[in-house]
Amino acid sequence: MAVDEGLKSELQKQGIFVLPFEQLYNWGRKSSIWPLQFGLACCAIEMIASAASRYDLARFGAEVFRATPRQADLMIVAGTVTKKMAPQVVRLYNQMPEPKYCIAMGACAISGGPFKDGYNVLKGIDRYIPVDVHIPGCPPRPEALIHAIMTLQRKIANQHLEKENRLRWYDKNSETEFLIPSYGEHDLQPPVNRDVWQPPRNYRSVTLDEVKKA
Amino acid sequence: MEGIEKIKEAAALAVPDARIEIVNSTPAAQQPSLLVDREHVHAVAKFFKEDPRFQMDFCSCVTGVDYLPKADKPGFIEVVYHLYSVTQREGPIILKVRTPRELDQCRVPSLTPLWRGCEFQEREAFDLYGVKFDGHPDLRRILMWDEFTDHPMRKDYVPPADYEWEPTPHDETLQRAVQAGGIMPPTAIEELEKAKKK
């Protein structure tokens, strides 16, 4: 926006703020993030600690934990996502009104963590819903969650409402619902939503012969 | 409480038809247990519960153990019950029942009619080991979803091969990831190539 910085500063001293609408809109949203009140495992205890008086998430405008997805705009996936729970987590995310964000908190939520090789644990919630901020840790300390909230705030502040790089929910044709996996005989069906998650591209597969030779 | 020999004698006297055997578990546990045949385990358990000498009023643990077939012996699944007496502050008496591993024959009588606390634990053994408990009031899966068909704590269970991306593969995971056509990070590939050169 072509406003002279000096003039802007002068006006601010008089109590007049000149800024693009987008910036004001983003400022409003990032300063009042309402998380969905749900926890899946021990990470939830750290999330509760972050909201309580010692760490006080209220300083970042994110203290209003809502007990319904209809009033929430941030999903903090705090804990191990079992395959039995995954469809419910995706359904809750679908029920949240847009704009909505997701923080995957802790080793389990981002990758399956210590239970990764288990038969019953999802290898990261990012296989079914888009995750904005990943927090490693087992469990992450409240400071790490606060850092993730601040990272998300920075992300929101730089988002665009229009033009090509606008967010998916400003696009009338965009899909608003994510696929809810169904319970299969051996695994969730499908085991991963390819529209949301792809393995990194610069990686390649290795054959059994290569391993044997090594 | 008396020694395991005396306990066995008392049970054998009360249920004369029962085939009861003393089995020693691993030396570390130091807890000999009673192996009872499937037909009489309910009667033996009832005796331990109701006899004034034992008053085993609490079944603390129900679990399954899977023994794969060996060259000379067929495999079996063992269901283990730990009984305690809260009244007498005694216990445990450990009851074991064996059943064939084949899913259609894998059944033992339920002890839920005697101890209500067995209900969920027997459901767990059913879910994870595939043991059917005859006489259980509500035998459904408890941990896995209803549509699931496997029994994951059995030793021959094969987990789904979702190894399409392994950031830090090693040992068994590496083998499985390779078999599943999984994708490795450049570091893992470099290590393979280094090993090849050596």
Image: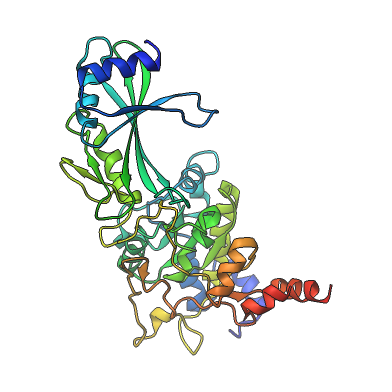
A101 relative position to A12: left or right: left
Assign the C terminus of chain A to one quadrant of the image: bottom right
Find residue B146 and report its image quarter.
bottom left
Residue B146 visible somewhere in the drawing: yes
**Most foreground residue, A182 or A74:** A182
B2 relative position to A105: left or right: left
The correct choice, above or below, for B132 with respect to B27 in the image is below
**Most foreground residue, A110 or B130:** B130
The tally of labels here is: 0
- The picture places residue B119, in percent across and down from the top left corner, at 24, 37
The residue sitting at the front extreme is B72
The residue sitting at the right extreme is B198
- The picture places residue A149, in percent across and down from the top left corner, at 53, 58
* Residue at position x 35%, y 57% in the image: A85
Assign the N terminus of chain A to one quadrant of the image: bottom right
The correct choice, above or below, for A191 with respect to B44 in the image is below
- The picture places residue B164, in percent across and down from the top left corner, at 53, 74
Find residue A210 and report its image quarter.
bottom right
